[in-house]
Amino acid sequence: MKKIILVVFASLFLIPSFAQHNAGNNGKVLMIASNPSVSKQTGWPIGVWYAELAHPYWVFSEAGYSVDIASPEGGEIKFDGFSDPEDPSQYAAFDYVSLGFKKDPAKMALTKNTLKLSTVNPQDYKAIFVCGGQGPMYTFYENTELHQFFVNFYQTGKPTAAICHGTCILIKAKLPNGKYLVEGKRWTGFASSEEQYADNYVGQQIQPFRIEDLARKMPNSKYECGAPFSAYAVKDGNLITGQQQNSGEAAAKLVLKALEEDKKRYPTYVLVHGAWADESAWGFVRNDLAKRANVVVVNLPAHGIDLTPANQVSLAAYVKTVSNAINAQTGKVILVAHSMAGIVASQVAENLTAKIDKIIYVSAYLPRNGEDLLTLSKKDSESKVGGALEFNANYSAASIKKDLIAPAVCADCPDFMKEALVKYHKAEPAKPLGEKVVLTAKNFGAVPKYYIHTSKDAAVGYELQQQMVKANGSIKKTFTMATSHLPFVVNPGEFLGILTSIN
């Protein structure tokens, strides 16, 4: 079984301006739409059908996926007139989802500058979804580049979908062995009965050919249809197809089901913040990480949105929260701990040794048996945090003096980040900082460990980091980033490169 990677990033500080809660957390889906064309049958300008882009887009976004839109030639795409909810024909006037998409400037901006298919890296996407409309019958049917892209993606085993007239590519698409991709597979597309209805509606033949007529003549054909203009979608292995414009949501939901089944192919990172932070600390890296991994974000008690009183939080509560996240996954995990989370992660590894493949510490406290964060921090001559702490009346919570937050944590951050660190600073439960870990050579000592140093760190000093690594004596490999305490903010690309290189 694929190993699962748990990232516990216990950053000392909050980065809420990049919260975007759950948006893109699950990775990326690529939607492929037709470039504008002109029908040789009707003379109409044609392209993609609104509902076949807007409805699946909504489903994927709601499920925590980010969506890119591509087209064979890139650039602007156009929508079929009858599919526009505001078209004078009123044919799609009921379609409020597409109307909302049309009225959103950010969404429409995506349609003005779609990715050119040849520039797309398919490895960045967990699924693809080929949209229909009237354009594909002219722009997709003979497009060998698109056919090959679809076949290649399908062969990875990842969810591969097409709907409505977009399924015309399946009349042509062949596997390397020369067989049609759909040979022996259940699939659907725009039905001949629906074509006839549309022809009758406008008083002429709209399409140059009918997908169903050709599909039923293919070798070992298992083409099927649902009721006319009903929501109908079919899943056969990782191939997913939808019948027509009313099937976009149904097909997209089958893609989500397939994505859930497909999680086993990816490592899983569970991102957990730490002191003076919440899960939004991962706004700079989590979506890029999710392109080729499963990403789960955990929020610790009394942090961010969690309203647990600080005086009710202990190290055991932190450990339990992280442990629950690990136990919810299958297979082993790689536990990556930043800063304060080094304490938490070490105790978690002691308790759940069988679930931990390795630990990666990032400018983190690396304790030995019987040590605690406060004891280690007293050895740190470079840190600006210790002398800047302010406690509440009963010493149950600690804050950092506002004028020292940015210098201590992220002196090399851009100004807007420094402002955010101060604005969203929240008092930290004090009890866990002084609680000692209980670690054994049999459990904690048996887990492989790695360390990412931050050489310009004024929160957990570089010298202390090196001392802790030396004292531990079992770190397999170290890396060094020339940043402050927040390497995943200052240089997220380098950070992710290091993180994902540790196999």
Image (cartoon, rainbow, N blue to C red):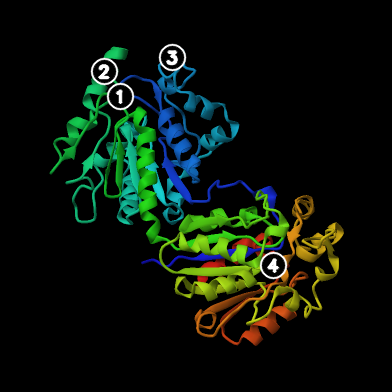
Q: Around disc 4, counting alpha carbons within 10 Å, would you say few (fewer than 14), some (14 to 19), or many (20 or more)?
A: many
Circle 4 or circle 3, nearest the eye:
4
Q: Position of residue 281 (x, y in %)?
A: 65, 56
Considering the numbered disc 3 on the image, is that residue within a helix, a strand or a loop? loop
Of callouts 2 and 3, the N-terminal one: 3
Circle 1 or circle 3, nearest the eye:
1
Circle 2 or circle 4, nearest the eye:
4
Indicate the amino acid at tag 1. Answer: Phe
Indicate the amino acid at tag 3. Answer: Gln
Of callouts 4 and 3, the N-terminal one: 3
Indicate the amino acid at tag 2. Answer: Tyr
Q: Which residue is mark 2?
A: 197
Q: Which residue is mark 4?
A: 432
Is 248 situated left or right of 77 in this image? left
Q: Is residue 349 visible?
A: yes
Of callouts 1 and 2, the N-terminal one: 2
Considering the numbered disc 1 on the image, is that residue within a helix, a strand or a loop? loop
Q: Are marks 1 and 2 in contact (CB under 8 Å)?
A: yes
Indicate the amino acid at tag 4. Answer: Pro
Considering the numbered disc 4 on the image, is that residue within a helix, a strand or a loop? helix
**Residue plotted at (42% across, 61% down):** 266
Toward which corner of the image does residue 457 lie, by quadrant?
Answer: bottom right
